[in-house]
Amino acid sequence: MNIVLCGMMGAGKTSVGIRLSQMTGRRWYDTDDLITQKYGKISNIFEFYGEERFRQMETEIVHHMAQEEDSIISTGGGCVLRMENCIAFKERGKIVFLEADLDELFRRAGHTGDERPLLKNTTKEKMQNLLEQRAPIYRACADYTVNTNGKSVDEVAEEILGLFGIRREN
């Protein structure tokens, strides 16, 4: 069974995914990294081809990754907004929504507009609008929700392992 991490930019999907991999010995994948390896910089994809083409590329990667077994998969912030991606991941995995409040998300990711096209020239209000649109979809798609506010990466990873009854390897 795969463990798939979803949530807003800044929720901790990459950091927690890496830590879960270290703790369990499972392979870790990041959908955004895989897109970058195959197609180039995400900001360039958005600029030259638009968000819709990026989402198509993302879905192609998701369908490939969903076939993995016993992996940790960190998704991009908009990945599970497409129902077909959510369904594909659930075929061999469980989805965990890493939830954080606006202040925490803005503190962690509000300065990353160059790497994250949807946060380019971001304001707290823009991030709040994105959060209000996405949070209900994350909740609907997820099998579990873990709040990351004020928690360390290790604390979040331990909580996720507890949800699945997985023991740490190291």
Image (cartoon, rainbow, N blue to C red):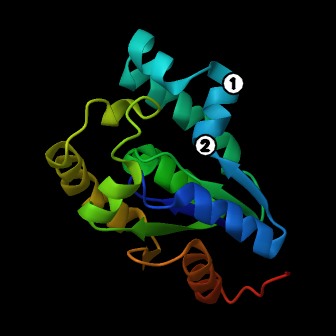
Quadrant placement of the C terminus: bottom right
| 120 lies left or right of 71 | left
Q: Residues within 10 Å of mark 1 (few under 14, many from 20)?
A: few
Residue 1 visible here: no
Residue 134 in percent (x, y) is at 28, 53
Mark 2 crowdedness (10 Å alpha carbons): few <14, some 14-19, many ≥20: many
**Is label 1 in a helix, a strand or a loop?**
helix
Q: Position of residue 114 (x, y in %)?
A: 42, 28
Residue 151: percent from the left, percent from the top?
47, 78
**From mark 1 to mark 2, how far is it between C-alphas?**
11 Å
Amino acid type at mark 1: Lys
- Report the disc number at residue 38: 1
Can residue 57 be seen in this snapshot?
yes
Q: Residue at x 73, y 85 (%)?
A: 166
**Residue 167: which quarter of the image?**
bottom right
Q: Which residue is mark 2?
A: 31
- Residue 13's spot in the image, x, y percent? 53, 59
Q: Residue at x 44, y 50 (%)?
A: 80
If you read the primary sequence from the N terminus, does the residue marked by circle 1 or circle 2 appear first? 2
SS at circle 2 = helix
Please tell me in which quadrant of the rendered image residue 14 appears: bottom right
Q: Give the quadrant of the N terminus.
A: bottom right
Q: Report the amino acid beneath label 2.
A: Thr
Q: Is residue 7 above or below residue 99?
A: above
Labelled disc at residue 162: none
150, above or below 114, in the image: below
Which of these two is toward me, 18 or 71? 18
Residue at the spot x=85%, y=81% of the render?
169
Tag 1–tag 2 contact (CB < 8 Å): no
